[in-house]
Image (cartoon, rainbow, N blue to C red):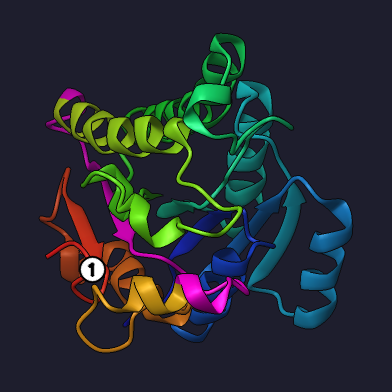
Amino acid sequence: MNLNNKTLIIIGAAGRLGREIVGAALESGANIVAVDQSEQALQVLQAKQGNNKGFLAIEGDITQAASIQRVIAAAVAKFGSLDGAVNTAYPRNDNYGRSFFDVTYEDFCENLSLHLGGYFLFMQQCAKYAVETQARFSLVNMSSIYGVMAPRFEVYAGTPMTMPVEYAAIKSALQHLGSYVSAYTKGSKFRVNSVSPGGILAGQDQAFLDRYNNYCREKGMLEPKDIVGAILFLLSDASEFVVGQNFIIDDGFSL
């Protein structure tokens, strides 16, 4: 996918999916501003890139408007323009991931505020930049297959894992929020879409993997590299008129 001369912000760049996106986008010719909250993880990314003039690592927090504005300003100062972004951030509190009946009202609200609120704030600031500068800008948000369908709770049986209720609320809302922002900025060159992956391999229990994979067509649980192609497409000019949509990549899990 041709991303030559495009400057892109990757939020959560040090994460499992973020690292894959950074590498693939650089290979496709983009300038990359890698953003994460972990200074140590960013140093590892920077060391890997060495003196690559098309790469900038910077700390950032999507729950703080000033931090987002600083990242956008740094991208423009370094590369002269800004053409798009991918948000893979996963902010949450220490109680995130409890079973449904153990989730408190306070934790539910805080996790929605951190995650959905952070995505809202990043969308808002990117849209503001694009509208004010009349820039062509493509934003890709990471949603989830469980933002599209109800969880298959049976695949978690006998494991300590569950599908957090906060996650379902956040990822489903995120898709509609993207459509809202796309409609609100109609007439500008700003667009936002989302990608909803199925499960991604991360050392899960084999019994869980077997049950999960039984619902899929061929591969089952995916690897980060399986998601990247759709993301690069949405960042490229090839998807110029794709606006406010959600791409599902799940090897048939939802069928």
| Quadrant in the picture for the N terminus | bottom left
**Residue 127 located within the stretch drawn in magenta:** no
Crowding at mark 1 (Cα within 10 Å: few <14, some 14-19, many 20+): many
Magenta residues, as a range? 184-208
Q: Nearer the viewer, residue 192 or 247?
A: 247
Residue 85, placed above or below residue 230: above
Q: Nearer the viewer, residue 220 or 32?
A: 220
Q: Position of residue 140 (x, y in %)?
A: 36, 52
Residue indicated by mark 1: 253
The structure residue drawn at horizontal position 40% and vertical position 54%, both measured from the top left corner, is 83
The structure residue drawn at horizontal position 54% and vertical position 10%, both measured from the top left corner, is 105
The structure residue drawn at horizontal position 89% and vertical position 59%, both measured from the top left corner, is 40
Q: Nearer the viewer, residue 181 or 222?
A: 222
- Left or right, 152 with respect to 5, comes to left
Q: Secondary structure at mark 1?
A: loop
Q: Nearer the viewer, residue 8 or 215?
A: 215
Q: Position of residue 188 (x, y in %)?
A: 20, 35
- Amino acid residing under circle 1: Phe
